[in-house]
Amino acid sequence: MKRRFATLDVFTEEPLTGNPLAVVRDCAGLDTQRMQAIAREFNLSETVFLLPPVDPINTAKLRIFTPTRELPFAGHPTIGAAILIGLTDAPGMIAAQDILIVLEEEVGVISCTVGRSRGRAPRARFTLPRLPKPAGIAGTALAIAEALGLAEDDIGFDNHAPCVYSAGNPFCFVPIASHAAIARAAPDLAAWPAAFGHMERGAAYLYTRGCERPGSHFHARMFAPGLGISEDPATGSAVAAFAGVLMDAEKPADGAPVFVVEQGFEMGRPSIITLGLDIVQGRLMEATIGGHAVLLQEGTIDA
């Protein structure tokens, strides 16, 4: 059966950069095994399947797959799917005003706004369905350094130390002392289990203050060999959980600070993710993830 699909580059305004995403729209009759096979065929970090919503008041239900497994939540699929729906179902409306798109994911119901300014790629922003929480204990700095091909003194800076947080997907957050060190990080698969094997998915999110672009606050890389992802160009669900890291290590003041995270530069796919926080009396009340996306291609797949 022929099924419509589209691919987008997410967290970018330039084609052939950012994080590629496949979105399959005609999903009637597809079971989990078939969706996994299609995701393996696309072989992107994630493939999204758009389904009718369980609650008809919502816009759509999403199922998200890496090449090897299904995920309960992911950031660039949420941004990309919302923008695709806006572009194809309401192109005139998103050019005139931001519209609300409500997506059902395994992690919960996610409210997104989609809009498009003249001369710019469309943008989307969603509110986290679940605030970040600690999700385990990180390995030792020495084990983490060995798993990343780094020295022990490359791990950590200021008040930042390795920790594990989740806002739907768990990540081990690894602060790296310098831009030079994060650039030379390379997973050692033999040493990986000793550092990250105790985690549910063994995903490591590296970050440092040294950035490539003016206006960015952190430079990041993400490795998840257990998910079939050697490196990810942009990881929205990690930046969502990163809100918890920032609250713990940076202790930002009350208000609505915005942090810009750049990722994917070492892969030749620069990506920009915006993290917004709402802080009241030292507590994180809400957080948002935002970014742009460009529609790259549309077609059909026989599946």
Image: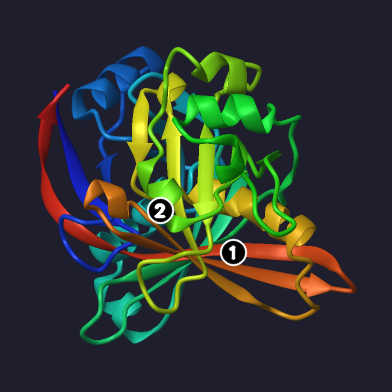
Q: CA distance from mark 1 to mark 2?
A: 30 Å
Secondary structure of the residue carrying numbered label 2: helix
The answer to which image quadrant residue 16 occupies is bottom left
Q: Which residue is mark 1?
A: 288
Residue furthest to the right? 281
Q: Which residue is mark 2?
A: 180
Q: Which of these two is toward me, 188 or 228?
A: 188
Which numbered marker is on residue 19? none
Secondary structure of the residue carrying numbered label 1: strand
Residue at x 30% of width, y 71% of height: 122
Could you say where residue 226 lies in the image, as x and y percent from the top left?
45, 20
Q: Residue flagged by tag 2: what amino acid is it? A: Ala
Q: Which of these two is toward me, 244 or 92?
A: 244
The relative height of residue 249 versus residue 45 in the rendered view (above or below) is: below
Q: Which of these two is toward me, 112 or 289?
A: 289
Q: Is residue 235 left or right of residue 289?
A: left
Could you say where residue 276 lies in the image, as x and y percent from the top left?
60, 70
Q: Is residue 47 left or right of residue 219?
A: left
Residue at x 29% of width, y 58% of height: 270
